[in-house]
């Protein structure tokens, strides 16, 4: 059974992978728009090929991150996880002297 610190690190890793997936998707969309725009005005130019190369880089990073995220989520159990102790406090009654 995994310790609590392993679980917390796993949750943080999943959160970070989700953030990076969003960042890479934005980068891929940006470079796709740039490649289309430059390709429309000046097809075959160096700027177009640089935009296409960066689009390929961001698309491959997005694909790898999505694959890692899917694998990490498949390893996680489906049961809910309780991260904190319950809020109610235990009251002890002291016997009067």
Image (spheres, rainbow, N blue to C red):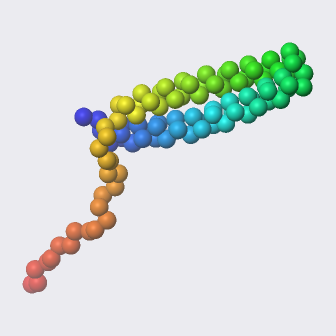
Q: Residue 2 sits in which quadrant? A: top left
* Residue located 31% across and 65% down the image: 87
Whether residue 12 sits left or right of residue 55 in the image: it is left
Whether residue 84 sits left or right of residue 12 in the image: it is left
* Residue located 71% across and 24% down the image: 55
Which residue is outermost to the bottom?
97
Q: Position of residue 12 (x, y in %)?
A: 46, 41
Whether residue 4 sits left or right of residue 15 in the image: it is left
Which residue is outermost to the front?
40
* Residue located 90% across and 21% down the image: 42
Which residue is outermost to the right?
42
In the picture shown, does residue 15 fall above or below 93? above
* Quadrant assignment for the C terminus: bottom left
* Residue located 35% across and 51% down the image: 83
Q: Position of residue 58 (x, y in %)?
A: 66, 26
Q: Position of residue 39 (x, y in %)?
A: 84, 23
* Quadrant assignment for the N terminus: top left
In the picture shown, does residue 45 fall above or below 38? above
In the picture shown, does residue 70 fall above or below 7? above
Q: Nearer the viewer, residue 45 or 15?
A: 45
Q: Nearer the viewer, residue 62 or 1?
A: 62
Q: Residue 93 sits in which quadrant? A: bottom left
């Amino acid at each position: 059974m995994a310790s609590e610190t392993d679980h917390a690190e796993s949750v943080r890793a999943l959160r970070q992978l989700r953030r990076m997936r969003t960042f890479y998707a934005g980068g891929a969309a940006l470079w796709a728009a740039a490649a289309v725009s430059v390709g429309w005005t000046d097809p075959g130019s160096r700027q177009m090929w640089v935009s296409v190369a960066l689009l390929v880089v961001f698309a491959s990073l997005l694909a790898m991150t999505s694959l890692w995220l899917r694998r990490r989520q498949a390893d996680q159990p489906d049961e809910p996880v309780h991260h904190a102790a319950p809020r109610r406090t235990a009251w002890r009654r002291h016997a009067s002297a």
